[in-house]
Each structure stands twice: as C-alpha cells, then as structure tokens.
Amino acid sequence: MNKPELLAPAGTMEKLKCAIRYGADAVYMGGPDFGLRNMAGNFTLAEMPQALAFCHEQGVRCYLTINSYPADHTLGRLENYLQELAPLPFDAYIVSDPGVLRMIRRISPEREIHLSTQANTINHESVLFWQEQGIGRVNLAREMTLEDISATTRAVSLPCEVFVHGALCIAYSGRCLLSSAMTGRSANLGECTQPCRWKYALVEERRPGEYQPIEEDSSGTFIYNSKDLCLLEYLPDLVRAGVASLKIEGRMKGVHYLAGVLRIYRTALDRFCADPDGYTADPAWMEELTTISHRGYTTGFLLGDPKDVGQSYQAGYLRSHKLVGVVEAMHGEKLAEVVVRNRFQAGDQLSLMGPAMKNADFTATDLQYYDQQGTLLPVATVHPNMRILMPVPAGTAPDDLIRLPAPMQEFDS
Ligand code: SF4
C-alpha cells in the first residue's frame, strides 16, 4: 500500500504558502490563461519562477493547469503561452483537450502531463487510452463509485488521482453550459458565474416580474445546487484502492478553507498510513470541517448515485467560524502583530488555528492599533486590513489564523 500524495489548490502566492504549511505534498495553480479558474487570482508568468522555487525548496511538487478547451482561433495564443512556459520547471501540466496535449508534446516533450477531471475518465480502458497518448497520471471523474475506482486502479499501472474534498458541479464535472447560456461566460473557458447556486422562481411569460411561490423551503428554490464533496470518512478505502493522489478542490477559496481542510486530511492520512489496522477517525475532524465555509457535505457518487441527498436546498454557505486575522509576526512569545481580515472587538472569544491541529481559545484584549507613523490610536473595533498588536496564546506562530465563532448562512466567497 503506497501513501498517496495530498494535492492542494494554490490560487495565489499566499494560498500556495498556506497549502504547503498545512501539509500539501503537491499544489496546482493556474496561469494567466487557459486554466479554467480565471477569477482565482492565479499566477503571472513573472510570478511563477518564485512560486516554483518556493515549492521545490520545500520538497513540494507544483503542477500548472492548462485544462480549458481552447477554440481553434486561440491556438496561436496558446502556442506562445506554451513557449513562454517551456523553461519553467513545472512538475507537470494538467490538461483536458487532446489538441493541447499534442501541442505540449511538441513544445515541451519532456514535460509530465496529467489528465484533468474535465476529460471525464470513468473506466480503465480510458485510462489505458490516455496512457498510450503519453499521459502520466489521470484524474478519475467524480462520478465514479469506490468499486469502479478500485477496479480501474487495479487494471492499470498509471497513477490515478481522485478528488476528495470541495465543490461539486451539478453537471458532469464542469461539462456545463448553464453559465454560457445565462451569462455568456463559459465554464469550459474558466469563467463560470455559478448559476447552479442561484435562487430560482417560476414566472408566467405574460406576467414578467411576478414570481410564483414554488419554494422548496422558506429561503427559495435551488434546483441545481450540489452539496460539497467530503470523502474524509472513506480516505482509508481510497488509499487501499491504490489511488496515487488525493486532490482538494478550491483555487478560489481562501486561506481559512485551505488550512482547515488540509490539516484534517493531512492528519488523517498520516495516521492511517502509519497504522492502517489501528486507525480510527477522530469525530472532531468532521466537526472541524463544518466550521469552514461549505454547502453541506455529500459523498457524491462514491457509494452510488447520491440522488437528492447530494443536493443542497439552501442558499449560500454554512460555517460556524469566520477568519478575523492572520498572524504576521510575533513580538515576544505572546504578543502578535495581526493583519485583520474581518471585524472583531475587545471581549470577543477567539480561537487560534495552526498546522498539526494546533488550536487554542482566547479572549481578545488589549488591542493596540498603530497608524503608519507608529502612533497608538484608540480603537474599539478593528476593521479589515488594519494591523494590530494583540496578546495571543503561547505557541502562536507567524501565519497562524485567528477565528471568531460566527454562524453564517449566506453568500460569502
Ligand atoms: S454553473 Fe455550476 S454546475 Fe455549471 S460549471 Fe458552473 S459550478 Fe459547475
């Protein structure tokens, strides 16, 4: 039984560093074009060498997504892009389109290439086909069951990757035209506006603006809205099935999501691989995953067709904690310089989170806000982007996160 790689999204440099700090073995990022998450921040060509150097110094592999389906008239732009990327030491490109694969083989013949989930690979014959085309790893479609995943990994020598956590599309792995049809922005070109998460109503065509009450619940009708995938409980089954990489979705998600999800999967994976027979999952792990922004959890297709239990009938996200600050530096053992992300005030009960399941509850006291000139200002409530000094629990380290219990059920990207 081999220990699989834990693969995390890196939407920006801050998120890349966060992913590595919280236990990623490998990260995937998008560039300025052709990467399917045009709104994720992404990396410019100028930023990529620094990101790659940082990953490789930490012993972390770095993959680049080039997984859109480019139209013929964009191939010249893609050719230039691939030429500019050629000298950069990416450990692999992630692609979907056979034409893109062919171009990469010509421009960077040595580059390892992984097949994206967008290619919807759902059986071992497909994996063998892609192996013949020079693919080095296949991401199996999220629509596969555990039984089919095991049968596929047993039948092939090519490493297979599966998504274990993150958002799901209501359509087949992003092969979806909702966004194109409703907004003109194509999901298959990285511009999904997520209409599957919108609230829908019924309108009779001669009465525009008169919405008929067809509510699934009091908050509306969400006919396309999938819950998020969470396969933590089945992580041992996936490792035993021989999956080579466990992938987390979410290049557009923030550091709170990344840190919270990664540290749980890192801990679970390490514990299971160290002692498979003695392994038991800690119930606190699932509890922890509900503190982070999500749409309710489902095991997707892993155990068969999820039918309506895979659908979320609620608007927006659920969570029990919000990120209010990131520790920038420590001044002594218990005084932190914090960059504020959301409002909080003296007296609030906060919790610290860090790698390796570091948690500590504390009360916000003695908040000191300094202006640019270093003058201490009297501030009762801190606002986003402020820098403050505040007492924190012993053991706090730079880049630790500070959270405030704050239940939410609304849109919050
Ligand atoms: S609209 Fe929803 S289902 Fe369609 S691609 Fe976008 S996120 Fe996926």
Image (cartoon, grey):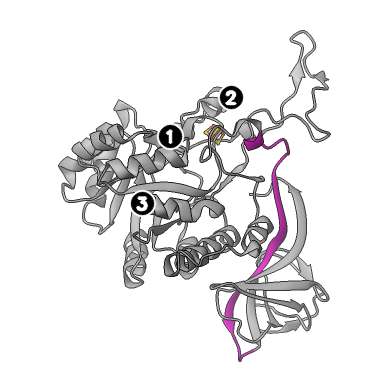
Task: Find the distance from the CA under tag 2 to the CA under tag 1.
Answer: 15 Å
**Depth-wise, is mark 2 or mark 3 nearer the camera?**
3
Side (left or right) of 390 relative to 3: right
Q: Quadrant of the N terminus?
A: bottom left
In the rendered structure, are the residues bearing label 2 and label 3 in contact, judged by CB atoms less than 8 Å apart?
A: no
Q: Is residue 34 visible?
A: no
Question: Residue at image x 63%, y 41%?
Answer: 227
Q: Is residue 212 visible?
A: yes
Question: Is label 1 in a helix, a strand or a loop?
Answer: helix
Q: Amino acid at mark 3?
A: Gly
On the image, the x and y values in percent for residue 121 come to 36, 35
**Few, some or many C-alpha atoms within 10 Å of disc 3 (few <14, some 14-19, many ≥20)?**
many
Numbered mark located on residue 219 in the image = none
| Residue indicated by mark 2 | 182
State the residue in front, 236 or 31.
236
Question: Is label 2 in a helix, a strand or a loop?
Answer: helix
Question: Is label 3 in a helix, a strand or a loop?
Answer: loop
**Few, some or many C-alpha atoms within 10 Å of disc 2 (few <14, some 14-19, many ≥20)?**
few
Question: Residue at image x 51%, y 30%?
Answer: 185
On the image, the x and y values in percent for residue 265 come to 51, 61
Q: Amino acid at mark 2?
A: Met
| Residue indicated by mark 1 | 189
Magenta segment? 309-333
**Few, some or many C-alpha atoms within 10 Å of disc 1 (few <14, some 14-19, many ≥20)?**
some
Question: Residue at image x 64%, y 82%?
Answer: 336
Task: Find the distance from the CA under tag 1 to the CA under tag 3.
Answer: 32 Å
Q: Does residue 20 lie above or below 213 as drawn? A: below
Q: Earlier in the sequence, mark 2 or mark 1?
A: 2
Q: Earlier in the sequence, mark 2 or mark 3?
A: 2
Assess whether residue 277 is covered by the magenta stretch.
Answer: no
**Depth-wise, is mark 1 or mark 3 nearer the camera?**
3
Q: Amino acid at mark 1?
A: Leu
